[in-house]
Image (cartoon, helix red, strand yellow):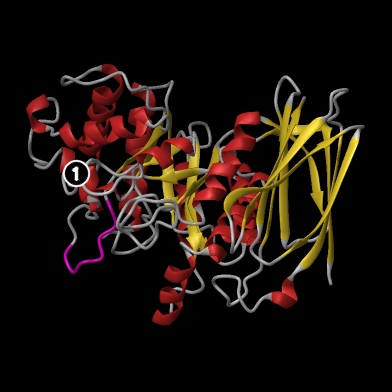
Amino acid sequence: MEKTHIITDFSALTGVIKPMHSVNNGPAGVRGNTNYSFYKDAAIPFARNHDANFAPSYGAPHTVDIIAIFPDFDADENDPASYDFHLTDEYNERIMSAGTKVFYRLGNKIEHESKRYGALPPKDPHKWARICEHIIRHMNEGWADGHQYGIEYWEIWNEPDLHPQCWDGPEAAFFELFEITARHLKACFPHLKIGGPAVTSMGNRGFLIPFFDYITRDKDNPVPLDFFSFHRYARNPDDMAAQATEARQMLDKYGYTETETILNEWNYVKNWQPPEDILYSYRVIPALKGSAFVASSILACQKSPLDHLMYYDARVGTPWNGLFDRLSGQPNKPYWAILNFSKLYQLKNEAVCTSDNPAVKAAAAVSDDGKEAAIMLCYYKDHESIDGSRCEEETITLRLDWEGFASDNGVTVTYRFVDADSDNEIRTEEVFFGAKGAHILKLPLYTAMLVTLQKN
């Protein structure tokens, strides 16, 4: 049986736990079953509101998208009567009431139909930028009976490299729109973070290189870019981390050394074609294998240069939502990965945590006062099994060692498991005395653990 060794030193800090457990979209609305309490308990840092316009419980088709808020492009963009903020305000407030911040996507949902509406290039890019300006003023500065939401992140468009579903026009027209909008919004709101463009993946160099060449063509005055967003659907968590490294390298190459990297759409996809592979992926997403993929991807990205990770999707009524049951709103297996990483995030300080097996990802954190600590780990391979059956030969022996966390009154260590038999239940608890601790156990494929330590 394969042996794996994880070593954690809570006295050796390496940085901070980053927001790797953000999502797309917020809790369900008042219509139908709600996942509100579970969503709130997960302490999700940010919710990106892309594709909210699909969801009836969020107010679709009257919410978030530019063509929903400003339906008549020929109207006066300076007149509050030209805008319809009602359902978008409700949706934002529901997200924020759960303790989650809004990450606002300025643009429109993906359009798979034979005719495009929001994916068409705006007739006047300067006017489109001014419309975005007024949306921000409504949300953050009280304009048009608005609010003081304090929304910090504003993303320009979504997947402009996906033709024609998200951009039904020349790429050069998008480059122009991005520059005009980014410069205008940054001039209006220098304190906010303006970025984008949420490309489909780092692999699309045919779009990315011309895009970066365009926005940096004026070497003395490049287009402002507070954050760069991109997407990745994959079957290997290491691929997610590799994409983060590529993003960092590209930004540094073009001089955007301080620009944040945000992977704000991701999930398990075996292959986009043939159709049976997508159907298989939809079965994986809410299942035990999907849970292990989510946990392992979060942990891999924590160790990468990535600044922010946002799971797609928490929107109700879509097969991409692996977190909540579509009918009951109850948690699916992947929900526990988000919830457990929130424990590390709340502890704030990342500690040294190494694994000698690339299939077993792990990260550790300790609180500012040194009284609490935690280790999160997960064992994942892209096995064909969805529920962990027929994987007996993949079971490994895990040795988990930790040090740098001791108390004269002992340390209470609690073990929670997410596996075929457990939904984050406490399986055992013990008290350790001395400066070190060690645990040896059998770890079946797709098992995730949260080990919490509390000084007595």
Asked whether residue 203 appears in the rendered view, the answer is yes
Which type of secondary structure does the marked residue at label 1 adopt?
A: loop
Q: Residue at x 47, y 63 (%)?
A: 285
Q: Residue furthest right?
A: 434
Taking the magenta stretch, the answer to whether it contains residue 111 is yes
- Decide: is 290 above or below 350: below
Q: Quadrant of residue 98?
A: top left
Q: Quadrant of residue 397?
A: bottom right
- Image quarter where the N terminus lies is bottom right
Residue nearest the observer in this picture, 298 or 199: 298
- Asked whether, in this view, residue 237 is left or right of residue 316, the answer is right
State how many labels appear: 1
Percent x, y for residue 121? Answer: 23, 51
Circle 1 crowding by C-alpha within 10 Å: few under 14, some 14–19, many from 20: some
Q: Residue at x 18, y 69 (%)?
A: 114
Percent x, y for residue 33? Answer: 27, 49
- Asked whether, in this view, residue 426 is left or right of residue 330, the answer is right
Taking the magenta stretch, the answer to whether it contains residue 226 is no
Percent x, y for residue 5? Answer: 85, 55
- Asked whether, in this view, residue 355 is left or right of residue 115, the answer is right
Give the labeled residue for mark 1: 59
Which SS type dominates the magenta stretch? Answer: loop
Residue nearest the observer in this picture, 160 or 112: 112
Give, as a single range, the part of the protein colored magenta. 109-115
Asked whether residue 256 appears in the rendered view, the answer is no
